[in-house]
Amino acid sequence: MKLRLLLSLLALPLVAQTTPFGTKVSAEPAPAAAPATAAPAAAGISDEFVDDSVQISPFRPSSLPEAKTTRTFQLSKLNRLGSAETTKELQRLYSAFASQSIVDGSPAGSSKALGYVTPVTYSVLQDLGDNRYLAKAAWPAAGPNEALAAGVDTMALLLLEKPAKAGDTGTIKGMHVGAVAILFTPDFAPLKGRRLTLRREAFVECVTLEESPAGLQRFVEAITAGAELSATTNETIPCKKCGGLGFTREAQKGQLVDKRIPCADCASTGKQIISVETKFVP
Ligand SMILES: [Zn+2]
């Protein structure tokens, strides 16, 4: 329900032509972690009347990175001698699955999150209507290689479950749905009364699957019944370039010992972290 609301918000036509900034609104790349109080330099068009309408348009979609590699977890091989399918591994992957699944009104009761889910601590700055709020927010980085950069004391758009008012604080599980352009009139200092557009990360409050033995049981039953489920995890593998050594060798003319060249691919650690999608099969 919430998700549908947000997606319909994001589906609104671009408002670039109708803003004081012309088409720049949708053409200009926004820094991922802009200073919290940043406002476009050109803002501050003073109108005779106070235009407090709010327009929100998609600016940059959320992008879950493509998993570098895929593999399958075959339930029928569980705990067979020599197989990678162990109870411990199933629990680890189920834990990832649960944290990547949003409870919703779909027939299965949940579906795959469309963006990174991360705890978002917030303090509401302004009610923008329809349960949308501009808030001072903070969240830890999420995704492989911090695909979603951490937010520290930055403004963000939140779609909350329950009505809130300016000054309300809390922590939610937020699903990142990308960046949006918000055209509005702030009613807080120091931007009060200035019609302006901010480009900010947007999060939808969500509930992820509860991780429990019963949940794991339902998960296994769903796979057995033919549900196509998968979980994405970060896995550490030996660096392909240096074979896990952290350096490559280069023969030196007239010398017995090779020159060791630090591996740039893995910063000499010998390890690489890759995103792996594990598909579950009966
Ligand atoms: Zn390497």
Image (spheres, grey):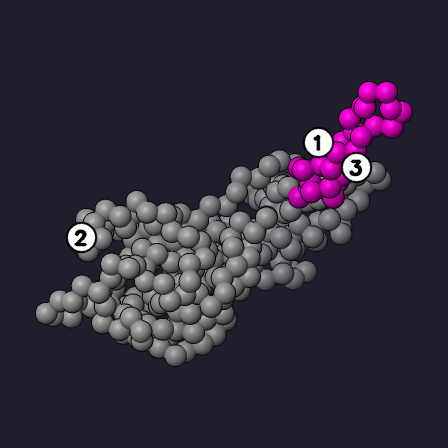
- The image shows residue 46 at horizontal and vertical percentages of 16, 67
- The image shows residue 184 at horizontal and vertical percentages of 25, 64
Q: Does label 1 point to a residue whose CB lies under 8 Å from ligand 1?
A: yes
Q: Main secondary structure of the magenta part?
A: loop
Q: Give the alpha-carbon distance from disc 3 to disc 1, as whole Å.
A: 9 Å
Residue 203 quadrant: bottom left
Q: Residue at x 32, y 47 (%)?
A: 28
Residue type at numbered disc 3: Leu
Circle on res. 245: 3
Q: Does label 3 point to a residue whose CB lies under 8 Å from ligand 1?
A: yes
* Among numbered discs 2 and 3, the one appearing first in the sequence: 2
Residue 3 appears anywhere in the view: no
Depth order, front residue of 127/263 = 263
Residue at the far top in the pictured view: 253
Q: Is residue 116 left or right of residue 235?
A: left
Q: Is residue 68 left or right of residue 169?
A: right
Q: Residue at x 70, y 53 (%)?
A: 91
The secondary element bearing badge 2 is classed as helix
Q: Residues within 10 Å of mark 3 (few under 14, many from 20)?
A: some
Judged by depth in the image, the label closer to the viewer, 2 or 1, is 1
Report the residue marked by disc 1.
241
Depth order, front residue of 115/212 = 115
Depth order, front residue of 2/268 = 268
Report the residue marked by disc 2.
18
Q: Does label 2 point to a residue whose CB lies under 8 Å from ligand 1?
A: no
Q: Range of the magenta residues?
A: 245-273
The secondary element bearing badge 1 is classed as loop
Residue 135 quadrant: bottom left
Q: Give the alpha-carbon distance from disc 2 to disc 3, as whole Å.
A: 57 Å
Residue type at numbered disc 1: Lys
